[in-house]
Image (tube, grey):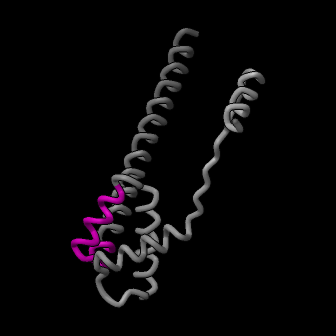
Amino acid sequence: MADEELEAIRRQRMAELQAKHGDASNNQQGEEAKQREKDMRNSILAQVLDQSARARLSNLALVKPEKANAVENYLIQMARFGQLGGKISESGLIEILEKVSQQTVKTTTVKVSFSDVSCFWLIITNCHS
């Protein structure tokens, strides 16, 4: 009986180790795939942007990574469909940045909460005086 229990525990432990090892290799493969994609994106961007435009895009990525990513996607899409005539200069990148800025909708929401109604009336009274 004890041997059967011990064998069951061993099998369970082996299954856990195999599952853990499998997850580690999947994570490693995922990291490698992400790195390959990043390298491919950088390669395409190096082909379509001149040095000053790449520097500007890198600076933008530090401040607004989501906007830089949108511009990179736009440039890669244009390059894949052959819509770029040559390398894009810094001024050309600025024009693209302006287009992307116009296309994105900026929304600002302001919530004002008053815990006391008298505070609200005090503010209104002072504003209209």
Residue at far bottom of view:
85
Percent of width and height locating residue 28 = 37, 47
Percent of width and height locating residue 34 = 39, 56
Quadrant of the image containing the N terminus = top right
Foreground: 129 or 105?
Answer: 129
Residue at far front of view:
129
Foreground: 26 or 75?
Answer: 75
Region rendered in magenta:
44-61
Identify the residue shown where x is 45% and y is 41%.
22
Q: Based on the displayed image, in which of its 4 quarters is residue 111 positioned?
A: top right
In the rendered image, the vertical position of residue 108 relative to residue 45, given as above or below: above
Residue at far top of view:
2
In the rendered image, the vertical position of residue 118 relative to residue 29, given as above or below: above
Left or right, 18 with respect to 58, comes to right
Q: Is residue 50 magenta?
A: yes
Q: Main secondary structure of the magenta part?
A: helix
Identify the residue shown where x is 56% and y is 16%.
4
Identify the residue shown where x is 27% and y is 69%.
54
Identify the residue shown where x is 78% and y is 24%.
117
Residue at far left of view:
51
Quadrant of the image containing the C terminus = top right
Q: Is residue 13 magenta?
A: no
Percent of width and height locating residue 59 = 30, 59
Percent of width and height locating residue 9 = 52, 19
Foreground: 70 or 46?
Answer: 70
Foreground: 93 or 13?
Answer: 93
